[in-house]
């Protein structure tokens, strides 16, 4: 009997042990909503990845996954991938210090949401785990990366880094990158990464704010040192919405890439074949804005590109950002500079209401040969380039539809038609004037109202391979100049952004933020209202005076204004020295209206954070008065503002004005994209009224922008060591017009850069030094 009891006991223990092991192995398998391996934490996730087989699905539980470094290593098979997916797409939030790296074969990631964090490595998502373990035949889909930025803009990372071969990024929403580095990069270093045939398709690339310098592309395909390698990457059916990071929205730096059927919507940059050759740019829409001269189209460098069936609308960009910019090259150019344009075909494209749409020899700088080394002189004109069967329409007429920055002897124009509304322009063989009209197909899309199929066409080499038009209509059945043969059977619904990105992310949300107005009658109420206010709220100051001892933190879109526009409320700031009345934080957007802001000599009126400016800020001051501060605005290194606007405002008795000159590394960076000053009065500012600096010779950086109009400057600059009242050294676009300068103890009102877009007009200067223009400014070479 005793033996039997012991035997049963031993059997029970053994059974329990087996059961325990089984339960531990399968504790992450059961999922009430789906079949697959269900995991609730990093430990379970890592175990599931280790044990996954072809065809398995690993399901991440809904909720917050913070500080996770996911290493998705697995070997699926064609038709049987290993899938890592969200339990509910968009409900798995990856935050904190988190990243995702893939390695192996046939892997799929679906439905993840990266938000409220930043990558601890060089990329948020990377198709490689290490140098020896890359991913092939793998896919990121139906996912979001939103505002997943490093702490400040000089810290570099990528959001998606492609390595390996045959990988894909599709139906994703990616927006808000503000730190240094392209949003998406294709890496071609190493044989395992060339001939990659990657696909980037059906994504929504949402707004990317200006960075204020280079290295802020939305997509970069390779780099200059691997630019002679074949990539064969396809970028198709994506929507680029206000991707304003820098002058290159897409920077192609490798060979045999294709860009098809994308929409570039009000993006302040261009699609650029920066290095590499033999790219196809076909069937894309480039939609501009009459209010912006920064929105470009296509810029060409290199050999063998075909630009076909593209539609350019309302583009006002100039030179590097012109609707079509065909560049000059550098003789015997090194890989990282400008290779001559040769054997390029530009055929069957349409430009509608674009300013000077066709520009050739862009970047020609022979006139700077005395200050630049020979290795920087772009003197090689485009050669063996065909521009044929294109259509140009201008509703108001264009004085220069074709701009020659150098000789056009290497360009062959054939059978191009233009309706310039009778306005005369420089005639070119192969550019013929024709009377035709357009009709609106839908918003932003105009098509010929006349049948243009009777116009002669140039039949160039391999033109027969252009078999369809922009809408997919057959060119074999009916052909015509321009991108459009006839109206499509269905409208493209160009601006319907629900066609792009994840199916679960609300791109077209009907929800509107409810904005509030707070009325405050005391300092404590003012402080409380600033803290409680939400995006877009307004605070009305009903008392006559407010005394502040600590800065007001501005980290949202907020308006402060006097309740009575005829009786300006006073904000008196007497906080610690070198602290601001208004502390501009990332995403802070402040508007002041009808206020009086007073300091006690040692403080700043406005200042950015000294560190961790992960995103930009904006500032507008209207109909206000500012006095008694050390600095009106102090912008620290690595901070950035998209716009600073002063309108109808009086600034008096301050030691310094607007200080935006901290980017002294001379790498093409600067502290603000746009500064607008109109109808303002400056009196008794001890040093610079404006100190705005961009250093480094980087010809593809086309900012910043300063406009000063209808303003007066009196008794300013007496203590300024540089003896320059408005210091704009290295800034590309400057306009000083209609201003009055009186009794300013400086040597120069301004020192403008003649070779760039620096201009002045109708200024009155009395006892205030000179306003000089220097054609070429000495700058440090960046390359």
Image (tube, rainbow, N blue to C red):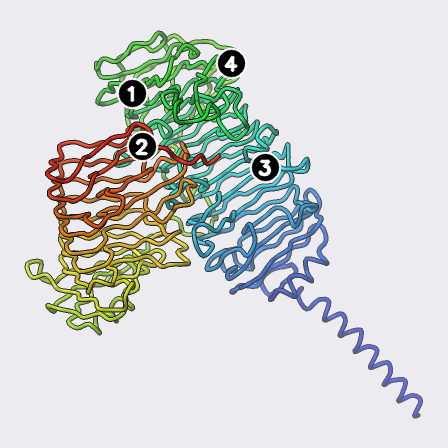
Image position of 89 (left or right of 106) = left
Disc 4 + disc 1, Cβ < 8 Å: no
Q: Position of residue 393 (x, y in %)?
A: 29, 20
Disc 2 + disc 1, Cβ < 8 Å: no
Q: Could you tell me how far apart the alpha carbons at marks 4 and 2 are, in whole angstroms?
A: 29 Å
Image position of 741 (left or right of 751) = left
Q: Position of residue 321 (x, y in %)?
A: 36, 30
177 or 700, which lies in front? 700
Sequence order check: which comes first, mark 3 or mark 4? 3
13 or 41, which lies in front? 41
Q: Residues within 10 Å of mark 3 (few under 14, many from 20)?
A: many
Disc 3 + disc 4, Cβ < 8 Å: no
293 or 624, which lies in front? 624
Image position of 403 (left or right of 502) = left
Query: How many numbered marks are there?
Result: 4
Secondary structure at numbered mark 1: strand
> What residue is shown with label 4?
464
Q: Position of residue 512 (x, y in %)?
A: 30, 56
Sequence order check: which comes first, mark 3 or mark 1? 3
For the point 51% across and 43% down, the residue is: 184
Secondary structure at numbered mark 2: loop
Sequence order check: which comes first, mark 4 or mark 2? 2
> What residue is shown with label 2?
444
For the point 48% across and 19% down, the residue is: 341
Q: Could you tell me how far apart the alpha carbons at marks 3 and 1 are, in whole angstroms?
A: 36 Å
* Res 779 → quadrant: top left
- Residue 198's disc number: 3
> What residue is shown with label 1?
393
């Amino acid at each position: 009997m005793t033996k039997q009891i012991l035997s049963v006991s031993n059997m029970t223990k053994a059974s329990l042990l087996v059961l325990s092991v089984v339960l531990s192995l399968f504790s992450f398998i059961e999922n009430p909503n789906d079949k697959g391996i269900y995991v609730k934490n990093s430990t379970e996730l890592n175990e599931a990845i280790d044990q996954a087989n072809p065809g398995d699905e690993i399901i991440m539980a809904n909720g917050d996954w913070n500080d996770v470094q996911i290493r998705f290593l697995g070997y699926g098979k064609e038709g049987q991938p290993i899938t890592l997916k969200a339990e509910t797409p968009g409900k798995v939030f990856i935050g904190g210090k988190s990243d995702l790296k893939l390695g192996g074969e046939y892997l799929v990631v679906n439905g993840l949401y990266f938000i409220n964090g930043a990558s601890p490595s060089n990329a948020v998502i990377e198709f490689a785990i290490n140098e020896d373990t890359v991913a092939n035949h793998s896919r990121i889909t139906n996912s979001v990366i939103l505002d997943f930025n490093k702490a400040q803009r000089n810290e570099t990372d990528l959001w998606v880094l492609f390595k390996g071969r045959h990988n894909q990024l599709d139906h994703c929403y990616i927006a808000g990158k503000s730190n240094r580095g392209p949003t998406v990069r294709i890496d071609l270093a190493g044989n395992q990464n060339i001939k990659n045939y990657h696909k980037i398709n059906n994504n929504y690339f949402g707004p990317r704010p200006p960075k204020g310098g280079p290295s802020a592309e939305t997509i970069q395909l390779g780099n200059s040192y691997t630019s002679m390698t074949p990539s064969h990457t396809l970028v198709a059916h994506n929507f680029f919405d206000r991707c304003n990071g820098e002058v290159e929205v897409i920077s192609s730096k490798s060979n045999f890439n294709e860009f098809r059927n994308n929409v570039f919507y009000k993006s302040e940059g261009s699609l650029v074949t920066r290095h590499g050759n033999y790219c196809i740019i076909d069937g894309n829409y480039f939609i501009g804005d009459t209010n912006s001269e920064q929105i470009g189209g296509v810029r060409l460098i290199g050999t063998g590109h075909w630009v076909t069936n593209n539609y350019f609308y309302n583009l006002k960009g100039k030179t590097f950002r012109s609707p079509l910019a065909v560049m000059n090259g550098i003789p015997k150019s090194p890989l990282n500079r400008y290779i001559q344009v040769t054997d390029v075909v530009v055929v069957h494209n349409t430009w509608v209401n674009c300013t000077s749409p066709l520009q050739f020899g862009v970047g020609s700088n022979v006139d700077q040969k005395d200050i630049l080394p020979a290795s920087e002189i772009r003197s090689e004109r485009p050669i063996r380039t065909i521009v044929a069967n294109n259509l140009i329409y201008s509703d108001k007429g264009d004085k220069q539809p074709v701009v020659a920055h150098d000789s056009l002897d290497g360009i062959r124009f054939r059978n191009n038609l233009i309706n310039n509304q009778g306005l005369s322009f420089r005639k070119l063989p192969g550019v013929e004037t024709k009377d035709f009209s357009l009709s609106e197909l839908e918003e932003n899309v105009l098509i010929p109202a006349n049948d243009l199929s009777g116009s002669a066409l140039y039949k160039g080499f391999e033109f027969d391979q252009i078999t369809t038009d922009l809408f997919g209509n057959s060119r074999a059945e009916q052909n015509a100049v321009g991108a459009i043969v006839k109206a499509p059977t269905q409208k493209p619904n160009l601006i319907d952004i629900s066609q792009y990105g994840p199916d679960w992310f609300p791109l077209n949300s009907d929800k509107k933020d409810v904005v509030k107005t707070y009325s405050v009658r005391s300092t404590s109420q003012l402080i409380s209202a600033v803290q409680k206010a939400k995006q877009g709220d307004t605070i009305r100051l009903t008392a006559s005076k407010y005394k502040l001892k600590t800065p007001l933190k501005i980290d949202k879109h907020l308006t402060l204004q006097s309740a009575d526009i005829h009786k300006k409320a006073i904000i008196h700031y007497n906080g610690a020295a070198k602290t601001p009345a208004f502390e501009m934080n990332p995403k802070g957007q402040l508007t002041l209206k009808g206020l009086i802001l007073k300091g006690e000599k040692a403080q700043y009126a406005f200042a950015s954070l000294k560190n961790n400016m992960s995103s930009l800020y904006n500032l507008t001051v209207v109909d206000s008065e500012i006095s008694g501060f050390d600095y009106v605005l102090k912008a620290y290194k690595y901070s950035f503002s998209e716009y600073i606007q002063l309108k109808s405002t009086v600034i008096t008795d301050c030691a310094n004005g607007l200080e935006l000159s901290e980017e002294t590394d001379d790498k093409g960076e600067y502290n603000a994209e746009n500064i607008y000053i109109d109808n303002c009065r400056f009196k008794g500012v001890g040093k610079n009224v404006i100190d705005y600096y961009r250093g480094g010779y980087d010809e593809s950086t086309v900012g910043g922008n300063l406009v000063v109009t209808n303003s007066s400057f009196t008794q300013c600059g007496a203590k300024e060591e540089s003896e320059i009242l408005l210091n704009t050294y290295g800034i590309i676009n400057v306009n000083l017009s209609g201003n009055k300068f009186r009794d300013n103890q400086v040597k120069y009102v301004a020192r403008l850069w003649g070779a760039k877009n620096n201009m002045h007009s109708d200024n009155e200067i009395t006892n205030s030094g000179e306003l000089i223009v220097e054609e070429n400014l000495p700058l440090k070479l960046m390359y």
